[in-house]
Image (tube, helix red, strand yellow):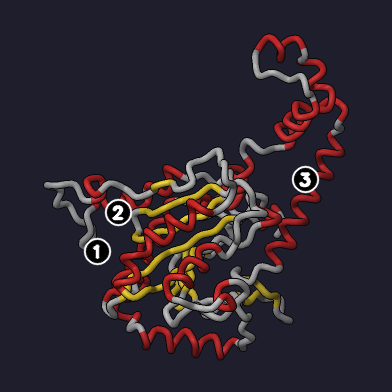
Amino acid sequence: MSEDNLSIRQMARMERESAGDDYMDRALAKQIAKDTAFTNDLDYIDDNSEKLAKQLKEKTVEQQKQAAIRDHRMMESVLDHCSLCFKEKEQRDGSKKLLAPEYPVVSLGNKVFLALPNYEPMNDGHCIIAPIEHISGSSLKCDDDMWDEIGNFMKCLIGTFASQNQGVVFLETVMSTKPSKTRHCSIECIPLPMDKAAEAPAFFKEGLLAADEEWSQHIKVIDTKLKTQAVAPKGDDVRDQDGNHARAREMIRKGGFRNTMTAKMPYFHVWFDPYGGMGHVIENADRFKPWFGREVVAGILDLPPTVYRKPRRLKETHNQRLDRASDWKKQFNWEKCDWTKMLLE
């Protein structure tokens, strides 16, 4: 994807993502790291300003340009190989055809879609929420409109599974903050029997306390859940077109998760409802298992390691994906709860 093909919204998002992490900042940080005598006070910085700036002066504009080109090509490669992206394919007549991702798509919103995994699911209801636009790694990079739709899908899934006496947990794992090393942002949705779902917070808390470094700089279990009073204030009868509290809708969008976690650091997060759950900052990616969330769910459901560690990739044709999505909709009576039907009215 060239810069000429980027929309204003995409360029603005890329600028936000790169803010605070540009070439000059990285180079200065590297120079400071090499200075063993560095102290973080103004007197030292003033006295050694020329020394700290030396490396920056040595770098030419051409070198910076080459670094930018290299990063751009690396990002293009990531997009080309992303299995969750909608891709354009040029036809013989010069027209372009939009190809669906390599996942069975269940519902398509304006900014976000619901799909089934392209690997062996943990159970029948296992599905994925993902933005249509390629967002690298963290859902915290999604804009407000995307979060409105993510919240809609979460609420619809909760209602769908509740009708079958099931709860649901929503999992997100971000192992790296580098765009070239991160996958398309996605949130896994895994239903649990209602009695097991009630026990899920205790299982996840226990798992997070034992995960990652023994002595960590951050709180191991970060509470991202909003207070009940903030979600549905007493005496507030203002409701939106879906019958929800207007303020509650706003709190889904600006929820505790978005105010508490950061996209600048790797993390794991589990939602027990649209209003938040538990988060964990990953300080050592070598010690934290990328399948941690699925492992906890497997422990709750008493499933074997093969289900969560390296699930088998499903080799399906486009028609087989359509059939699997259709069967899922029928099994869970998705049409009854699917909020995206409003977009067609």
Q: Amino acid at mark 2?
A: Arg
Task: Answer with mark 2 or mark 3, whichever residue precedes in sequence.
Answer: 3
Residue 24 visible somewhere in the drawing: yes
Between circles 2 and 3, the one closer to the viewer is 2
The residue nearer to you, when weighing 310 against 9, is 310
Q: Residue at x 42, y 71 (%)?
A: 300
Mark 1 crowd level (few <14, some 14–19, many ≥20, 10 Å Cα)? few
**Residue linked to disc 2:** 249
Q: Residue at x 76, y 15 (%)?
A: 49
Residue 64 % position (x, y): 81, 38
Q: Is residue 28 above or below residue 125?
A: above
Residue 215 disc label? none
Residue 232 % position (x, y): 21, 51
Task: Answer with mark 2 or mark 1, whichever residue precedes in sequence.
Answer: 1
The residue nearer to you, when weighing 249 against 126, is 126
**Residue linked to disc 1:** 242
Q: In which quadrant will I find the N terminus?
A: bottom right
Residue 266 % position (x, y): 58, 49
Q: Residue at x 76, y 50 (%)?
A: 71
Q: Secondary structure at mark 3?
A: helix
Q: Amino acid at mark 3?
A: Ala
Q: Secondary structure at mark 2?
A: helix
Q: Is residue 224 above or below residue 123?
A: above
Rounded to the nearest angstrom, the CA distance separating label 2 from label 3 is 39 Å
The quarter holding residue 241 reads bottom left
Image position of 275 (left or right of 144): left
Q: Residue at x 60, y 46 (%)?
A: 283
Q: Are marks 2 and 1 in contact (CB under 8 Å)?
A: yes
**Residue linked to disc 3:** 68
Q: Amino acid at mark 1?
A: Asp
Q: Secondary structure at mark 1?
A: loop
